[in-house]
Image (tube, grey):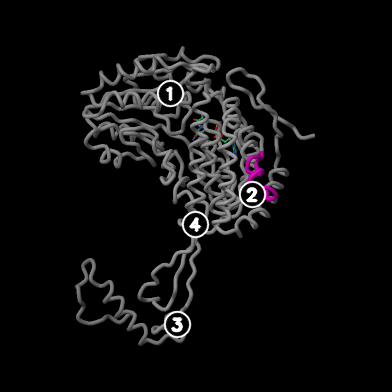
Amino acid sequence: MTATFDSLDPATGDVAGTYPEQGPDEVRAAVTRAQEAARWWSALSFGERAEHLTRWKGVLTRRMAQLVEVVHAETGKPYGDAQLEVVIAIDHLAWAASHAKKVLGVRNRAPGLLMANQAATVEYLPHGVVGVIGPWNYPVFTPMGSISYALAAGNAVVFKPSEYTPGVGVWLANSFAEAVPGHPVFQVVTGHGDTGAALCRAGVNKVAFTGSTRTGKRVMAACAENLIPVIIEAGGKDALLVDADADVDAAADAAVWGAMSNAGQTCTGIERAYVHHQVYDQFVAKVVDLARDIRVGSDDDAQIGPITMPAQLDVIRDHLTDAVARGATVLLGGPDAVGDRYVQPTILADVPQDARAITEETFGPTLTINKVADMDEAVTLANATRYGLGSAVFSASRGAALARRLRSGMTSVNSVIAFVGIPSLPFGGVGDSGFGRIHGPDGLKEFTYAKAVTRQRFAAPLALTTFSRQPKTDAQVAQAITVLHGGGGTLPAKPKRFPRPW
Ligand code: NDP
């Protein structure tokens, strides 16, 4: 008999659903079925695939309330937040389906003078089967950022959802099967970490992982055994910068929502704020005011829910305790704000830069605020992290300039986390936040390999790729290349004598 595991409602501990613990044999069988389905799917035209994906999009949209219910039950997040992640995921699916041809289809390339007799084209072909390993914090939006783009690019997908949100994964795969019956182009396998590890070794052609940096390294190591390429989206320690000329009320509102929404369990959540000394007091007062009013719970009026993964409670408490022990000032909440299931909003100020609340991902409804002398210091401190996922800047006059100096994959100026809702923008990080990109044209290309084709149109005037090449040809090539490229650097613009190439 297949072993099973329960997914629990984090607000109550009640069983939300029971799912099979799938082992290596079952995972391999799913990948084998996916390989067959991928042959059918990849042979369709972009337009045909878009039609299927549009049908799926319709199912997702019409049944949104059902999906929102599953997300709420498994993560505890408020219905409005659950709906928001579904809505953004649908928008991404629509974008991926409608832009795949333009981004990935065959394009002519200029052959250049040396190969003027060739026609050159490039197109982007699917890898085959993509394994997607997803997290629990945004169980629809995050994996769909890989699934939608991988499918639109012509791959089949086998998805391993987090052990905390298997029901969401099963719901998504079932809805796809309804829209695209008869071909298991998108399947789900359920289980714990071992199921994810098995997926990496089951014959997939690429793996897209979202989760912790530690597990990301293990996924990479498993994939390295068979030289399977990976995308790693591994969380962050995002900073928000507030300049002297910023709209302080807007910055405070964004900081509080960026740090506290989804109970802080957001990879691009704001965890640190660096604020110009001229507006520091005003910012701090406003942030504390707003954060104090956030309603925590699971009733209809709650704005943030429970901590989905119980083990995270200890991490949050440890970070807060460590910061206080190192001299941080508690402005709201604190270590005692961490309960059995819920964490009350917590604001810390003057947090030393070596505190864990500054150096490690906290993933709770907490925010550290530090005063800076100027924006150079703000940039230096924001960049002093191993992570580099997202960031935000509030500044009236130099937002874009400051944004460019921040070492992170995405930055919002005068707003927070706005980049996730723009399907044409790439999403991904640097450093311990991982590498590779989902979303947008980069996200589509991430699930393909570039295929270059040359076609000889007529015999070359200079025959280069033959053993019958003559010294005269070599001399002509040297002459041509000197005319073309000899003008750069320290070389004379027009050499008096053409050098012999030997
Ligand atoms: P993990 O990185 O452990 O898990 C992420 C996914 O990987 C889950 O589906 C998990 O399955 C799976 N997995 C676990 N072990 C392996 C393995 N050896 N091979 C392949 N897949 C595996 O994250 P956690 O959920 O444990 O959260 C830990 C921390 O990660 C959080 O505290 C937070 O800081 C960060 N995090 C970041 C996220 C982001 O958005 N970037 C999302 C979630 C967490 P299973 O759940 O069944 O163990």
Q: What residue type is labelled 3?
A: Phe
Q: What residue type is labelled 2?
A: Val
Q: Mark 3 points at which residue?
A: 458
- In what element is the residue under mark 3? loop
**Residue 85 as seen in the image, left or right of residue 397:** right
> Dot 2: within a 10 Å radius of its alpha carbon, few (fewer than 14), some, or many (20 or more) residues?
many
User: Is ligand 1 within 8 Å of the beta carbon of the residue shown at mark 1?
Assistant: no
Quadrant of the image containing the N terminus:
top right
Given contact means CB atoms under 8 Å apart, are the residues at marks 2 and 3 in contact? no
| Residue 185 badge | 2
**x and y percent of residue 408 in the render?**
37, 40
- In what element is the residue under mark 1? helix
Residue range in magenta is 174-189
At 71% across and 39% down in the image, what residue appears?
23
Residue 84 is inside the magenta segment? no
| Residue 56 badge | none
Q: What is the quadrant of residue 127 in the picture?
A: bottom right
Q: Name the residue under label 4.
A: 101
**Which badge, 1 or 2, is on the more N-terminal residue?**
2
